[in-house]
Image: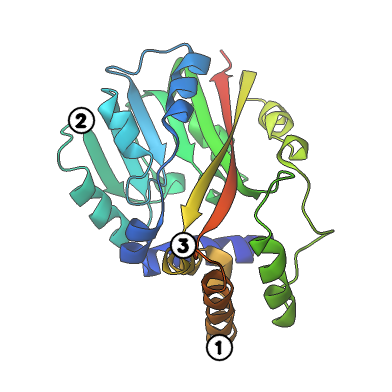
Amino acid sequence: MNEERRILRAQTFDDVADLYDRARRGYPEQLFDDLFALAEMSPHGSRILEIGCGTGQATRPLARRGCRVMCVEPGPNLARIARRNMAEFPRVTVINQRFEDFDPAGATFDMVFAATAWHWIDPQVRYSKAASVLKPGGVLAFTWGTHAFPPSFDPFFTESQKTYNAIGQSWDGAWPPPPPEQVPDLSEEIERSGYFEDVRVARHLWTTDFTAEEHVALMSTASDHRLMEPTKREWLFSEMRRLHNARPDGIVRKHDLTILHVARRKP
């Protein structure tokens, strides 16, 4: 993804903030248990800077564990909804700002955390910026996620791929994509940055069931789909509904792979 495309895609979520809040599911609780186990850190009272919180899908599990969370969210609509959603947690603060522009005013954090948002940050500055706001020995943690295709993946996605092909949005590579265990993590990239060491990784493969309207709502918030020509996007969604409705129960099961990376700031 080139830089111009990255910026365009990153800006699409705020345009559909209310739908994003309804359609996006949360993360498995085990992810957060692993987060603090790998970081060797107690969550209670930990000062966490969360990058790109969206409407709070990952913020809530952090807040429930007693973390003090400052969220930096660039989308004004997303930030507004996140503040509403986190109103019950007085230890959570939401700032409407890009992480690249964030000024901590001398504050430092135990952890910088990003749930499926790290890849939207400027790659030229994200590691150095994260290191600059961490206390000595602090932890950078982020997840990278993708639609996963284990041997048991739902054949719906092979059927729907024909629809993507028809509108010129073919999968980039052989179909089906590689199985979850072959999807690489970002350990080498973290180490190459020169700012972090002791990289630890945990993989989570999980499933979610969707009705036709739930699946279309989810895909309506996907950045690549937001940038499609509207007529192509609507035809794609109508075909998704048709494939859903052809099933006896109308349900599709989606596998997601979430790769958690945890690394310690170098002295």
Question: Dot 2: what SS?
Answer: loop
Vertical comparison of 2 with 100: above or below: below
User: Looking at the image, how many numbered discs can be counted on the residues?
Assistant: 3
> Residue at position x 72%, y 30% from top?
192
User: Do residues under tags 2 and 1 come within 8 Å of each other at their CB atoms?
Assistant: no
> Residue at position x 27%, y 30% from top?
63
In the picture, measured across the screen, residue 7 lies left or right of residue 48, that is right
Q: Amino acid at mark 3?
A: Leu
Q: Which residue is mark 3?
A: 218
Q: Amino acid at mark 1?
A: Thr
Vertical comparison of 222 with 242: above or below: above
Q: Which residue is mark 1?
A: 231
Mark 2 → mark 3, Cα distance in angstroms: 29 Å
Badge 2: few (under 14), some or many (20 or more) residues near its Cα, within 10 Å?
some
Q: Amino acid at mark 2?
A: Arg
Residue occupying the far bottom of the picture? 231
Q: How is the image coloured?
A: rainbow
The part of the image, by quadrant, that contains residue 225 is: bottom right
Numbered disc in front, either 2 or 1: 1
Q: How far across and down, in percent of the image, does residue 87 sit?
A: 16, 43
Of callouts 1 and 3, which one flags the residue occurring earlier in the amino acid sequence?
Answer: 3
Residue 11, label in figure: none
